[in-house]
Image: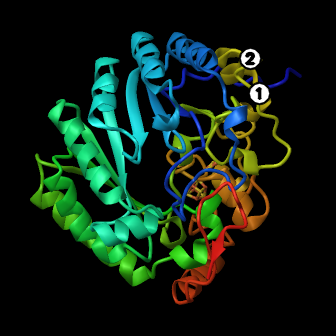
Protein backbone atom coordinates (compact mmCIF):
# COMPACT_ATOMS: atom_id res chain seq x y z
CA UNK A 1 0.00 0.00 0.00
CA UNK A 2 1.43 3.43 -0.88
CA UNK A 3 0.89 6.43 1.38
CA UNK A 4 -1.41 9.14 -0.01
CA UNK A 5 0.72 12.16 -0.98
CA UNK A 6 -1.29 15.35 -1.54
CA UNK A 7 -0.42 17.31 -4.69
CA UNK A 8 1.83 20.34 -4.14
CA UNK A 9 -0.20 23.47 -3.37
CA UNK A 10 -0.70 26.19 -5.99
CA UNK A 11 1.28 29.36 -5.19
CA UNK A 12 -0.23 31.77 -2.67
CA UNK A 13 -1.98 34.78 -4.17
CA UNK A 14 -1.16 37.20 -1.39
CA UNK A 15 1.04 37.96 1.52
CA UNK A 16 -0.16 39.85 4.59
CA UNK A 17 2.65 41.22 6.70
CA UNK A 18 2.12 42.53 10.21
CA UNK A 19 5.16 44.79 10.09
CA UNK A 20 4.69 45.85 13.70
CA UNK A 21 2.13 45.61 16.48
CA UNK A 22 2.78 49.22 17.47
CA UNK A 23 -0.34 51.34 16.87
CA UNK A 24 -1.57 54.71 18.10
CA UNK A 25 -5.16 53.42 18.31
CA UNK A 26 -6.59 51.07 20.89
CA UNK A 27 -9.54 49.42 19.12
CA UNK A 28 -11.55 46.94 21.15
CA UNK A 29 -11.91 44.60 18.15
CA UNK A 30 -8.30 44.45 16.96
CA UNK A 31 -7.48 41.12 15.31
CA UNK A 32 -3.91 41.15 16.65
CA UNK A 33 -3.20 38.64 19.41
CA UNK A 34 -3.84 39.89 22.95
CA UNK A 35 -0.15 39.20 23.69
CA UNK A 36 1.27 41.84 21.33
CA UNK A 37 4.81 41.53 19.98
CA UNK A 38 7.26 44.07 21.41
CA UNK A 39 9.05 46.45 19.00
CA UNK A 40 12.50 45.08 19.92
CA UNK A 41 11.55 41.65 18.52
CA UNK A 42 10.44 42.92 15.10
CA UNK A 43 12.15 41.73 11.92
CA UNK A 44 14.70 44.14 10.50
CA UNK A 45 14.17 45.79 7.14
CA UNK A 46 16.54 43.51 5.23
CA UNK A 47 14.64 40.41 6.36
CA UNK A 48 11.32 41.94 5.32
CA UNK A 49 12.83 42.72 1.91
CA UNK A 50 13.99 39.10 1.58
CA UNK A 51 10.41 38.00 2.36
CA UNK A 52 8.96 40.28 -0.34
CA UNK A 53 11.44 39.00 -2.95
CA UNK A 54 10.68 35.40 -1.99
CA UNK A 55 6.93 36.01 -2.14
CA UNK A 56 7.18 37.41 -5.66
CA UNK A 57 9.43 34.51 -6.74
CA UNK A 58 6.91 32.06 -5.27
CA UNK A 59 4.15 33.58 -7.43
CA UNK A 60 2.34 35.87 -5.01
CA UNK A 61 0.65 38.84 -6.68
CA UNK A 62 0.12 41.29 -3.87
CA UNK A 63 1.29 42.27 -0.43
CA UNK A 64 -0.83 43.86 2.29
CA UNK A 65 1.37 46.06 4.46
CA UNK A 66 -0.39 45.84 7.79
CA UNK A 67 0.15 45.95 11.54
CA UNK A 68 -0.64 47.33 14.09
CA UNK A 69 0.03 50.53 12.26
CA UNK A 70 2.53 49.78 9.46
CA UNK A 71 3.60 53.43 9.10
CA UNK A 72 4.96 53.26 12.67
CA UNK A 73 7.94 51.57 10.99
CA UNK A 74 10.50 54.25 10.14
CA UNK A 75 11.49 52.23 7.05
CA UNK A 76 7.95 51.92 5.65
CA UNK A 77 8.83 53.90 2.49
CA UNK A 78 11.90 51.76 1.84
CA UNK A 79 9.92 48.55 2.42
CA UNK A 80 7.14 49.72 0.12
CA UNK A 81 9.67 50.51 -2.60
CA UNK A 82 11.26 47.08 -2.36
CA UNK A 83 7.90 45.30 -2.42
CA UNK A 84 6.86 47.30 -5.47
CA UNK A 85 10.18 46.71 -7.25
CA UNK A 86 9.81 42.99 -6.53
CA UNK A 87 6.68 43.10 -8.69
CA UNK A 88 4.08 42.90 -5.91
CA UNK A 89 0.92 45.03 -5.91
CA UNK A 90 1.23 46.97 -2.67
CA UNK A 91 -1.69 47.75 -0.36
CA UNK A 92 -1.18 49.83 2.79
CA UNK A 93 -3.66 48.98 5.57
CA UNK A 94 -3.54 51.98 7.87
CA UNK A 95 -5.27 54.05 10.53
CA UNK A 96 -4.00 57.14 8.69
CA UNK A 97 -2.52 58.46 11.95
CA UNK A 98 1.04 59.66 11.71
CA UNK A 99 1.13 60.02 7.92
CA UNK A 100 1.46 63.64 6.84
CA UNK A 101 1.27 64.82 3.25
CA UNK A 102 5.04 64.55 2.74
CA UNK A 103 5.14 60.94 3.94
CA UNK A 104 2.09 60.07 1.86
CA UNK A 105 3.85 61.51 -1.21
CA UNK A 106 6.96 59.45 -0.44
CA UNK A 107 4.85 56.30 -0.25
CA UNK A 108 3.24 57.07 -3.60
CA UNK A 109 6.66 57.76 -5.17
CA UNK A 110 7.91 54.46 -3.74
CA UNK A 111 5.26 52.63 -5.76
CA UNK A 112 2.33 52.26 -3.37
CA UNK A 113 -0.64 51.01 -5.40
CA UNK A 114 -3.56 51.21 -2.98
CA UNK A 115 -4.49 52.42 0.49
CA UNK A 116 -7.04 50.94 2.88
CA UNK A 117 -8.01 53.37 5.62
CA UNK A 118 -9.93 52.42 8.75
CA UNK A 119 -12.72 54.47 10.31
CA UNK A 120 -14.18 53.58 13.69
CA UNK A 121 -17.41 55.49 13.13
CA UNK A 122 -19.10 58.13 10.99
CA UNK A 123 -18.45 61.18 13.16
CA UNK A 124 -15.70 62.71 15.26
CA UNK A 125 -17.03 61.67 18.65
CA UNK A 126 -17.59 58.02 17.74
CA UNK A 127 -14.35 57.74 15.82
CA UNK A 128 -12.15 59.20 18.54
CA UNK A 129 -13.87 57.28 21.34
CA UNK A 130 -13.82 53.86 19.67
CA UNK A 131 -10.27 54.30 18.39
CA UNK A 132 -9.28 55.53 21.85
CA UNK A 133 -7.40 58.44 20.25
CA UNK A 134 -8.40 62.13 20.30
CA UNK A 135 -7.93 63.87 16.96
CA UNK A 136 -8.02 60.70 14.88
CA UNK A 137 -11.05 61.92 12.92
CA UNK A 138 -9.27 64.94 11.42
CA UNK A 139 -6.11 62.97 10.66
CA UNK A 140 -7.95 60.18 8.93
CA UNK A 141 -9.90 62.60 6.78
CA UNK A 142 -6.67 64.37 5.85
CA UNK A 143 -5.01 61.08 4.91
CA UNK A 144 -7.96 60.19 2.65
CA UNK A 145 -7.40 63.51 0.89
CA UNK A 146 -3.69 62.80 0.30
CA UNK A 147 -4.53 59.43 -1.25
CA UNK A 148 -7.25 60.62 -3.60
CA UNK A 149 -5.25 63.74 -4.57
CA UNK A 150 -2.40 61.43 -5.63
CA UNK A 151 -4.85 59.47 -7.78
CA UNK A 152 -4.49 56.27 -5.78
CA UNK A 153 -7.53 54.05 -5.22
CA UNK A 154 -8.85 54.36 -1.66
CA UNK A 155 -10.76 51.74 0.29
CA UNK A 156 -12.47 52.65 3.56
CA UNK A 157 -12.75 49.89 6.10
CA UNK A 158 -15.25 50.08 8.95
CA UNK A 159 -15.52 47.32 11.52
CA UNK A 160 -19.13 47.15 12.71
CA UNK A 161 -20.32 46.26 16.21
CA UNK A 162 -22.95 47.26 18.75
CA UNK A 163 -21.54 50.76 19.36
CA UNK A 164 -21.52 51.89 15.72
CA UNK A 165 -24.02 49.66 13.91
CA UNK A 166 -26.54 52.51 13.93
CA UNK A 167 -24.08 54.49 11.74
CA UNK A 168 -23.85 52.12 8.76
CA UNK A 169 -25.78 54.46 6.46
CA UNK A 170 -23.65 57.43 7.57
CA UNK A 171 -20.44 55.42 7.04
CA UNK A 172 -21.54 54.76 3.46
CA UNK A 173 -22.14 58.51 2.98
CA UNK A 174 -18.69 59.20 4.46
CA UNK A 175 -16.99 56.84 1.98
CA UNK A 176 -18.72 58.61 -0.92
CA UNK A 177 -17.79 62.04 0.46
CA UNK A 178 -14.11 61.02 0.80
CA UNK A 179 -13.93 59.73 -2.77
CA UNK A 180 -13.35 56.07 -1.86
CA UNK A 181 -13.80 53.54 -4.62
CA UNK A 182 -14.51 50.70 -2.23
CA UNK A 183 -15.98 50.35 1.25
CA UNK A 184 -15.72 47.32 3.49
CA UNK A 185 -18.58 47.09 5.96
CA UNK A 186 -17.02 44.38 8.06
CA UNK A 187 -18.99 42.99 10.97
CA UNK A 188 -16.59 42.14 13.79
CA UNK A 189 -14.85 38.77 13.58
CA UNK A 190 -14.26 37.48 17.09
CA UNK A 191 -10.54 36.74 17.44
CA UNK A 192 -7.84 38.35 19.55
CA UNK A 193 -9.06 41.51 21.26
CA UNK A 194 -12.53 41.20 19.74
CA UNK A 195 -12.98 37.82 21.39
CA UNK A 196 -11.92 39.31 24.73
CA UNK A 197 -14.50 42.12 24.27
CA UNK A 198 -17.22 40.07 22.60
CA UNK A 199 -19.99 40.79 25.10
CA UNK A 200 -19.44 44.53 24.67
CA UNK A 201 -19.37 44.33 20.86
CA UNK A 202 -22.07 41.84 19.88
CA UNK A 203 -25.06 43.45 18.12
CA UNK A 204 -28.53 41.94 18.06
CA UNK A 205 -29.78 39.86 15.15
CA UNK A 206 -32.31 42.60 14.31
CA UNK A 207 -29.54 45.23 14.16
CA UNK A 208 -27.46 42.97 11.91
CA UNK A 209 -30.40 42.33 9.56
CA UNK A 210 -31.09 46.06 9.32
CA UNK A 211 -27.43 46.84 8.54
CA UNK A 212 -27.41 44.23 5.76
CA UNK A 213 -30.55 45.75 4.23
CA UNK A 214 -28.95 49.22 4.31
CA UNK A 215 -25.85 47.91 2.50
CA UNK A 216 -27.91 46.10 -0.11
CA UNK A 217 -29.94 49.22 -0.87
CA UNK A 218 -26.79 51.35 -1.07
CA UNK A 219 -25.13 48.88 -3.44
CA UNK A 220 -27.97 49.34 -5.90
CA UNK A 221 -28.04 53.13 -5.44
CA UNK A 222 -24.26 53.60 -5.77
CA UNK A 223 -23.57 51.13 -8.57
CA UNK A 224 -20.64 52.41 -10.64
CA UNK A 225 -19.62 54.88 -7.92
CA UNK A 226 -18.77 52.81 -4.84
CA UNK A 227 -18.24 49.08 -4.43
CA UNK A 228 -19.40 47.89 -1.01
CA UNK A 229 -18.07 44.64 0.42
CA UNK A 230 -20.03 43.16 3.30
CA UNK A 231 -18.54 40.80 5.87
CA UNK A 232 -21.44 39.27 7.77
CA UNK A 233 -21.15 38.20 11.42
CA UNK A 234 -20.40 34.51 11.86
CA UNK A 235 -22.51 33.98 14.95
CA UNK A 236 -25.77 34.76 13.12
CA UNK A 237 -24.74 33.11 9.84
CA UNK A 238 -26.11 29.95 8.23
CA UNK A 239 -22.82 28.99 6.62
CA UNK A 240 -19.26 29.85 7.68
CA UNK A 241 -16.90 32.03 5.68
CA UNK A 242 -14.03 30.41 3.77
CA UNK A 243 -11.62 31.72 6.39
CA UNK A 244 -8.36 33.05 4.91
CA UNK A 245 -9.64 31.68 1.59
CA UNK A 246 -9.01 28.18 2.94
CA UNK A 247 -6.13 27.16 5.21
CA UNK A 248 -2.80 27.19 3.33
CA UNK A 249 -4.58 27.78 0.03
CA UNK A 250 -4.19 31.41 -1.06
CA UNK A 251 -2.42 33.49 1.59
CA UNK A 252 0.50 33.67 3.99
CA UNK A 253 0.54 35.96 7.05
CA UNK A 254 3.83 36.92 8.62
CA UNK A 255 3.91 38.18 12.22
CA UNK A 256 6.15 41.08 13.33
CA UNK A 257 8.73 38.59 14.58
CA UNK A 258 8.73 36.58 11.34
CA UNK A 259 6.46 33.66 12.11
CA UNK A 260 4.70 32.54 8.92
CA UNK A 261 1.04 31.76 9.62
CA UNK A 262 -1.84 30.39 7.51
CA UNK A 263 -4.14 33.00 9.14
CA UNK A 264 -3.74 35.84 11.62
CA UNK A 265 -5.03 33.84 14.61
CA UNK A 266 -3.29 30.54 13.84
CA UNK A 267 -1.01 30.79 16.86
CA UNK A 268 -4.07 30.26 19.07
CA UNK A 269 -4.12 26.60 17.93
CA UNK A 270 -1.91 24.49 20.18
CA UNK A 271 0.38 21.83 18.79
CA UNK A 272 1.30 23.59 15.55
CA UNK A 273 4.87 24.74 14.95
CA UNK A 274 5.13 27.82 12.78
CA UNK A 275 8.41 28.23 10.93
CA UNK A 276 10.13 31.59 10.90
CA UNK A 277 11.11 33.52 7.77
CA UNK A 278 14.49 34.19 9.42
CA UNK A 279 15.29 30.45 9.17
CA UNK A 280 13.30 29.23 6.17
CA UNK A 281 12.47 30.54 2.72
CA UNK A 282 8.82 31.35 2.06
CA UNK A 283 8.75 28.58 -0.55
CA UNK A 284 10.03 26.05 2.00
CA UNK A 285 7.39 27.19 4.48
CA UNK A 286 4.56 27.12 1.94
CA UNK A 287 5.40 23.63 0.70
CA UNK A 288 6.85 21.88 3.73
CA UNK A 289 5.87 23.46 7.06
CA UNK A 290 3.55 20.84 8.63
CA UNK A 291 1.47 23.66 10.13
CA UNK A 292 0.46 24.83 6.62
CA UNK A 293 -0.50 21.25 5.71
CA UNK A 294 -2.44 20.61 8.94
CA UNK A 295 -5.81 21.78 7.55
CA UNK A 296 -5.01 22.15 3.86
CA UNK A 297 -7.52 20.74 1.38
CA UNK A 298 -10.28 18.39 2.53
CA UNK A 299 -8.53 15.27 3.88
CA UNK A 300 -8.39 16.63 7.44
CA UNK A 301 -12.14 17.31 7.60
CA UNK A 302 -14.60 15.66 9.96
CA UNK A 303 -17.25 13.56 8.25
CA UNK A 304 -19.86 16.35 8.45
CA UNK A 305 -17.78 18.55 6.13
CA UNK A 306 -16.13 15.82 4.12
CA UNK A 307 -19.45 14.60 2.72
CA UNK A 308 -20.87 18.12 2.25
CA UNK A 309 -21.16 19.71 -1.19
CA UNK A 310 -19.87 23.05 0.19
CA UNK A 311 -16.55 21.57 1.35
CA UNK A 312 -14.61 23.29 -1.44
CA UNK A 313 -16.61 26.53 -1.10
CA UNK A 314 -16.01 27.36 2.56
CA UNK A 315 -13.29 24.76 3.31
CA UNK A 316 -15.02 23.91 6.59
CA UNK A 317 -14.94 27.52 7.81
CA UNK A 318 -12.52 28.78 10.42
CA UNK A 319 -10.18 26.52 12.41
CA UNK A 320 -9.45 29.16 15.04
CA UNK A 321 -13.15 29.76 15.63
CA UNK A 322 -13.81 26.01 15.83
CA UNK A 323 -11.16 25.82 18.53
CA UNK A 324 -12.34 28.90 20.43
CA UNK A 325 -16.01 27.85 20.47
CA UNK A 326 -15.89 24.04 20.54
CA UNK A 327 -12.48 23.31 22.03
CA UNK A 328 -11.21 21.42 18.95
CA UNK A 329 -9.77 23.06 15.82
CA UNK A 330 -10.70 19.97 13.76
CA UNK A 331 -14.41 20.43 14.34
CA UNK A 332 -16.76 21.95 11.80
CA UNK A 333 -16.88 25.72 12.33
CA UNK A 334 -19.95 26.24 14.57
CA UNK A 335 -20.96 29.16 12.35
CA UNK A 336 -22.30 26.39 10.10
CA UNK A 337 -25.95 25.57 10.83
CA UNK A 338 -25.14 21.84 10.47
CA UNK A 339 -22.71 21.96 13.39
CA UNK A 340 -24.10 20.48 16.62
CA UNK A 341 -22.74 23.61 18.36
CA UNK A 342 -24.50 26.12 16.09
CA UNK A 343 -27.65 26.73 18.14
CA UNK A 344 -25.59 27.26 21.28
CA UNK A 345 -23.40 29.98 19.76
CA UNK A 346 -26.37 31.77 18.19
CA UNK A 347 -28.11 31.76 21.59
CA UNK A 348 -24.91 33.02 23.24
CA UNK A 349 -24.67 35.87 20.71
CA UNK A 350 -28.26 36.90 21.38
CA UNK A 351 -27.71 36.83 25.14
CA UNK A 352 -24.50 38.87 24.86
CA UNK A 353 -26.17 41.43 22.59
CA UNK A 354 -28.57 42.18 25.43
CA UNK A 355 -25.91 42.37 28.14
CA UNK A 356 -24.36 45.57 29.43
CA UNK A 357 -20.97 46.61 28.11
CA UNK A 358 -19.13 45.18 31.13
CA UNK A 359 -15.37 45.48 31.28
CA UNK A 360 -13.69 46.86 28.15
CA UNK A 361 -10.19 45.74 27.26
CA UNK A 362 -8.70 48.49 25.09
CA UNK A 363 -5.92 47.20 22.85
CA UNK A 364 -2.67 47.91 24.61
CA UNK A 365 0.69 46.40 25.46
CA UNK A 366 -0.62 46.46 29.02
CA UNK A 367 -3.09 43.60 28.88
CA UNK A 368 -4.51 44.69 32.23
CA UNK A 369 -5.69 48.04 30.79
CA UNK A 370 -9.40 47.65 31.44
CA UNK A 371 -12.21 50.10 31.94
CA UNK A 372 -15.62 49.46 33.43
FE1 LIG B 1 -19.08 24.07 5.15
FE2 LIG B 1 -18.63 21.87 6.63
FE3 LIG B 1 -20.88 23.29 7.00
FE4 LIG B 1 -20.55 21.87 4.75
S1 LIG B 1 -20.75 21.03 6.85
S2 LIG B 1 -21.35 23.96 4.90
S3 LIG B 1 -18.31 22.10 4.40
S4 LIG B 1 -18.74 23.98 7.36
FE1 LIG C 1 -7.53 31.10 11.74
FE2 LIG C 1 -9.94 31.51 10.64
S1 LIG C 1 -8.73 32.93 11.81
S2 LIG C 1 -8.63 29.80 10.35
Looking at the rendered structure, the secondary structure element under dot 2 is loop
Say whether mark 1 is within 8 Å of ligand 2.
no
Quadrant location of residue 87? Answer: top left
Can you give x and y, in whole percent of width and height, for residue 93 in the image? 42, 40
Mark 2 or mark 1: name the one nearer the start of the chain. Answer: 1
Looking at the image, residue 190 lies above or below residue 371:
above
Question: Can you tell which mark lies on residue 115?
Answer: none
User: What residue sits 49% from the left and 46% below the top?
Assistant: 313
Residue drawn at 62 percent across, 33 percent down:
248
Quarter occupied by residue 113: top left
Residue 67 pos. (x, y %)? 53, 41
Residue 278: image x %, image y %? 73, 19
Task: Please tell me how crowded label 2 is: few (under 14), some (14-19), or many (20+) other residues with Cα within 10 Å.
Answer: some
Whether residue 185 can be seen here: no
Kindly check if marks 2 and 1 are in contact, taking CB atoms under 8 A apart as contact. yes
Dot 1 lies on which element? loop
CA distance separating discs 2 and 1: 7 Å
The residue that mark 1 highlights is: 275
Instruction: Say left or right for 338 vs 180.
Output: right
Residue 100 versus residue 4 in the image, above or below: below
- Residue tagged 2: 280
Q: Nearer the viewer, residue 292 or 107?
A: 107
**Residue drawn at point x = 29 percent, y = 67 percent:** 124
Q: Quadrant of ligand 1?
A: bottom right
Amino acid sequence: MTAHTPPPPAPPIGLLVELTHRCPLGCLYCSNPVALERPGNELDGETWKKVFSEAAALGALHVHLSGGEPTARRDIVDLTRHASQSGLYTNLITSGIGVNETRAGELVDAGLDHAQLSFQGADKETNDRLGHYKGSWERKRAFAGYVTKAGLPLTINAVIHRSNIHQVAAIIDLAVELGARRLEVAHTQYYGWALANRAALMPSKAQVDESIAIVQAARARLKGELVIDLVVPDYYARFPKPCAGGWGRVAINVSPTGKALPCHAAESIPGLEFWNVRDHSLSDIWHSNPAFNAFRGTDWMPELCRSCDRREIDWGGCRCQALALTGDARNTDPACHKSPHHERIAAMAMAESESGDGVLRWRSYKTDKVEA
